[in-house]
Image (cartoon, rainbow, N blue to C red):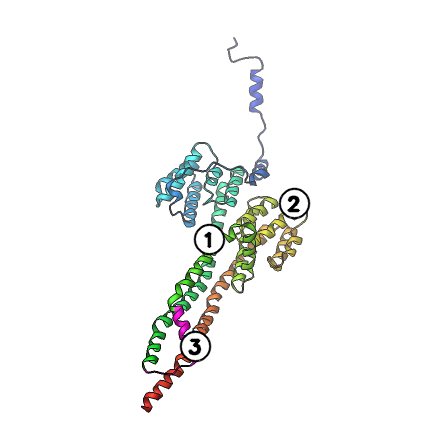
Amino acid sequence: MATKGDKPGGQTKRVRATTKKKPSAAKKTAAARRVPEEVFTPTEVAPRPPSQFFQTSSVRPGDITVFLRQLIMMLEAGTPLLRSLKTLAERGHKSSMRALVGDIAMYVETGNPLWQAFERHSKYFDTVFVNLIKASEASGTLVTVLQRVTDYRARRAMLRSRVRAGMFYPVILVFVCFGVLLFISKAIMPEFENLFTKFDVEISGWTRFFMGASKAFGNFWWVGLLVIVGLVLVYKLWYVQHPLRRLTADRMKLKLPVVGNILLKNATVEFSRTLAMLLKSGLSMMATLELCRNAIHNRAFAHTLQGMRDSVEQGAGLEEPMRAAADIIPPVVTDMVVTGEETGRLDSIAEQIADTYEEEVNIAIDGLGDALQPILTIILGIIVGLVILSVGIPLISMIEQLGAG
């Protein structure tokens, strides 16, 4: 007797369902690697989080790197993503990081993808990071891409801190010279002036001019300081806010002696390192160049990538636009990139370029201090020589008058 579930054709349907072919492992791998092109276009913008404590607290890039490394360790140990996020949100050593990770965990818990949770905090996770996480979630390689992008962030932050420290050294030397001048004008020159007046010593026109200039500098040094601070604020808050002015300013930075060479090599490292990472993650050349353009801080260097992207879009290669920008992109870099493009090893060659130029940046920064020390010595020697020339002759004249008397 047939039961209620034994409908005509029911057994056949069950057999067909159980005999459905399973995809092979090779097909699964190929499908995982094929990530839709729209994954890399950051057009979808997740809603921003409401104003919270961590937005005004001190969340540093190093804190983000530590969080990502801890997340990688937990995911590699087999802990589910949501549980990992919640655990890190509870055990963070800083309240600002706990709030940030907690907001990410809450957003993922409501059913949203991880890349959207990161995108809501664009202050800490840039476009390159968000698009790589988006691609890794689509291809199932989240842990691998997280490891790659975390190493990339750490190396980039370390190089940037070294460049900033190297650029800060000339500023220190300028302030040292300024302090020496202020000490001479406030402590030394007034004593000599009183001494010459007391003994009625006849002084030359040069000495009188130097003492007057020294007195003016001692009384109005703060005016010059205010002018410098004002120029810096105008540059930061107004001049570079316009894209064309920012482009001009960044181009001029690359032309500066010594410092411009360091900035150019640093931009080359940023471009090469980002290019290698994105290509290794499976992104297309068009998407890679677009993200590289957004990741480079120097707008003059980034502007050349737009021409490279347009050339690729038109079906041409990278060589012609790179040769046209020989004043910004070093010719040896162009040669290596063209070789990598022709041999299909552009990602590994770009990484070699980044390693080489990063080492050159470190050497240039170390040499910057050695080059500026003799310059400072010469400047201070000139200042001391002017002081001796201004007060030495009247002082000798005064001693001779005292000896004759």
Residue 60 picture location, percent across and down: 41, 49
Q: Residues within 10 Å of mark 2 (few under 14, many from 20)?
A: few
Residue at image mark 2:
313
Q: CA distance from mark 2 to mark 1?
A: 32 Å
Helix, strand or loop under label 2: helix
Which SS type dominates the magenta stretch? helix
Rendering quarter of residue 186: bottom left
Residue 3 picture location, percent across and down: 51, 10
Q: CA distance from mark 3 to mark 1?
A: 44 Å
Helix, strand or loop under label 1: helix
Above or below: residue 115 compared with residue 244 = above
Residue 22 appears left or right of 70: right
Image quadrant containing the C terminus: bottom left
The region drawn magenta spans: 199-217
Residue at image mark 1:
157
Q: Is residue 354 visible?
A: no
